[in-house]
Image (cartoon, grey):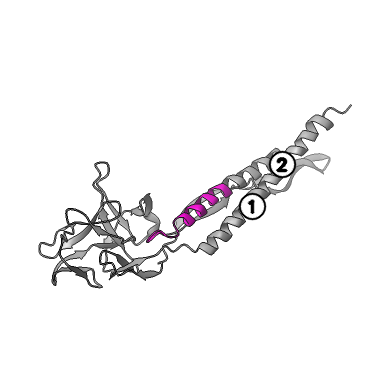
Amino acid sequence: MIRGLYTAISGMITQEAKQDVVTNNLANANTVGYKEDNLAITRFDDVMLQNYDKVVGGKNVRNEIGTLSLGSKVDSINTDFTQGMIQNTEKPTDFAIEGRGFFAVQRNDGVSNGQYYTRDGHFHVNMNGTLVDDSGDTVLGRNLQTGQLGPINIGAEKFECDASGNISLNGTPMYKLYTADFNNYSSLKKVGDNLYQGDNAAPNNAVVRQNSLEKSNVNVINEMANMITTMRSFETNQKIIQSLDETLNKAVNEVGSAR
């Protein structure tokens, strides 16, 4: 009976974790370039129940009754990198990647100076004339004159970007948006602000669309259905615990005190 409590509680813990993932997906349903997460649940290793009630040759021998599940646990949280719908915005500082690939940004906040990756192409030009994302991180590009990788300085110039990511200032090609991809997306980790961190990034020739943004790939209807299912599973485990608690109460206070 005590094992039953542990099993039901483990179910409540996993359903609570799943609810957190679903809630986060719904909260980011309108976040540009957001990729939804999915919680993978597994079970603890089964244990073998046995006793010595079986008698063979006048002796009690081990008798295997069967296996018992000890409940469930969180296995992993996986990100679905399926592309979201691309929407036209008519804003020249909006970019979207069609197909595989990520924009690369440089974070210079005095704490972390690393390179990060994102599908969120909602950029703008800061006061210094540099192309940055919503968090102020520098969007990286290759200078077509020097070949160096660094900030994209647009200034107050009129600019255009072709499908290959080449940025022209007043009709002269000056920069190429740096895009990268990964052979294994499982190495990517979300670090907040719609950014990813990963190893072994390789430059790729992504198809870039200017004046467009990639919408979130969250399916709101599916997530609402997942939320309802998760809540019902949580409530079911909760009722099981209440029933076991009432049974234990009777066993201790009524049956145990009977004379």
Question: Viewed as shown, does residue 93 lie left or right of 218?
Answer: left
Establish if 57 lies above or below 223. Answer: above
Query: Is any atom of residue 167 visible in this view?
Result: no
Name the quadrant of the C terminus.
top right
Q: Bin the neighbour count of mark 2 within 10 Å (Cα to Cα): few under 14, some 14-19, many 20 and up.
A: few
- For the record, the magenta segment spans 15-34
Q: Amino acid at mark 2?
A: Gln
In this rendering, the answer to whether 44 lies above or below 80 is above
Quarter-wise, where is residue 125 in the image? bottom left
- State the residue at coordinates (64%, 52%): 233
Q: Could you tell which of marks 1 and 2 lies nearer the N-terminus? A: 1
Q: Residues within 10 Å of mark 1 (few under 14, many from 20)?
A: some
Find residue 45 and report its horizontal and vertical position in percent: 60, 47
Task: Specify whether residue 29 is painted magenta.
Answer: yes
Of 60 and 167, nearer the camera is: 167
> Circle 2 — which element?
helix
Q: Which residue is mark 1?
A: 233
Using residue 223 as the reference point, say whether residue 5 is left or right of it: right
Say which element carries label 1: helix
Label placed on residue 242: 2
Instruction: State whether the magenta stretch is mostly helix, strand or loop.
Output: helix
User: Observer-nearest residue: 11 or 62?
Assistant: 11
- Where residue 9 sits, quadrant-wise, is top right
What amino acid type should be assigned to the residue bearing mark 1?
A: Ser
Q: Quadrant of residue 96?
A: bottom left
Residue 166 is at least partly visible in this image: yes
Q: Residue at x 73, y 38 (%)?
A: 245
Report if the CB atoms under discs 1 and 2 are less than 8 Å apart. no
